Structures are given as structure tokens and as C-alpha cells.
Amino acid sequence: MMKHLFLAVTIAGLALTANAQTEKARKTEGKESQIEKKKDYSAEQRAALATRRLASKLNFTNEQQRQSIEILTVRENARDAFKASKKDESAKVEWKKIKKESNEKFKSLLTDEQKQKWETLKAEKKAENKAKKGENKETEEEFHNFED
């Protein structure tokens, strides 16, 4: 009787583990396909997408949306050039310069209330990214510990 109970619990545990792994794989697969789709977007499309997201959170006017798309398109084109250059030092300097300029231009088109909200959104995103990196680091450590 105990053997049957032990066998049933073991099978149930294995089934739950397999299901959890399948669910995690599905989530990862979805993120990878989103990333792949973004790679195919032009600089203008990425700028428009980012503007659309920000416009909904910061309540942009039509003029702010137009200016945001212009600013972010320049930035995305610079980012593409930086990536295409294999990230050499001169391209890195130029990328940082354009990134700083675009941030300043973007900030200048915001109202004081929008600036506060934007700073909050950036801080939340930074914390979220930091948490993700921490999760990835823990997973890597578990993997390396498993190999040992």
C-alpha cells in the first residue's frame, strides 16, 4: 500500500514539474518572438511605438506626439548605426552624445507634471530591469552549481 502511495505522489510531482517547465518555456518563447519582431522594425516604427506607449502614460498632445516621434527616430537611427559599427569606440561616443541630446530634447517638450511622471516611469523600469538581472543571475548560479 505504501509503495502505491509513494508511486502516486512521485508521479504527481513529476507531472507538476513538467507542467511548470512547459509553462516557463511558453513564456520565454513569447518573449523571444516579440524580440525578433522588434528587430525587424525600422527606426521610425520603433520611435512611433515608443511614442504611442509614452503618450498613453503621459497624456501627450498631438504636437508632443509628433515631436517625440522626430526625436526618437533620430535616436533610433543613431542606435542602429552604433550597432552596425560593431560598437567601436568612436561610434560609442557619438551614440552617447545623441542619446544625451535626445533625452534633453524629449524632456524639454514635457510639462512639469509629465516630467515627474516620466522620471517615475524610468525609475520603475530601472528597478524592473535590475530585478530581472538578479533573477537571471540566480538562475545562472543555480545552473553552475548544478554542473559542479
Image (cartoon, rainbow, N blue to C red):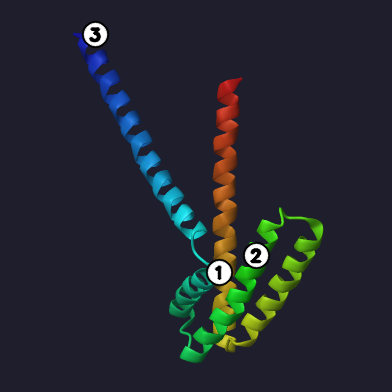
Marks 2 and 3 close (CB-CB < 8 Å): no
Circle 1 residues within 10 Å: few <14, some 14–19, many ≥20: many
The kind of residue on which mark 2 rests is Arg
User: On residue 79, which mark appears?
Assistant: 2
Query: How many angstroms separate mark 1 from mark 2 (CA)?
Result: 9 Å
Q: Quadrant of the C terminus?
A: top right
The percent coordinates of residue 101 (x first, y second) are: 71, 77
- Residue visible at 49% across and 70% down? 45
- Seen from the viewer's position, the closer of residues 105 and 129 is 105
Q: Mark 3 or mark 2, which is nearer the start of the sequence?
A: 3
Dot 1 or dot 3, earlier in sequence = 3
At 50% across and 76% down in the image, what residue appears? 51
Cβ atoms under marks 1 and 3 closer than 8 Å:
no
Residue 73 percent across, percent down from the top left: 58, 75
Q: Specify the quadrant of the image occupied by residue 103.
A: bottom right
Q: From the image, which quarter does the N terminus lie in?
A: top left
Under mark 1, the amino acid is: Ala
- Of labels 1 and 3, the one closer to you: 1
Q: Position of residue 114 (x, y in %)?
A: 55, 83
Q: Position of residue 102 (x, y in %)?
A: 67, 77
Q: CA distance from mark 1 to mark 3?
A: 63 Å
Lateral position of residue 12 relative to residue 142, left or right: left
Where residue 118 sits, quadrant-wise, is: bottom right
Badge 3 crowding class, 10 Å Cα cut-off, few under 14, some 14 to 19, many 20 or more, is few
How far apart are labels 2 and 3 at the CA level? 62 Å
Q: Circle 2 sits in a helix, a strand or a loop, which is it?
A: helix
Nearest the viewer among 2 and 35 is 35
Question: Which residue in the structure is indicated by mark 3?
Answer: 3
> Which residue is disc 1 drawn over?
43
Indicate left or right for 17 with 88 as reference: left
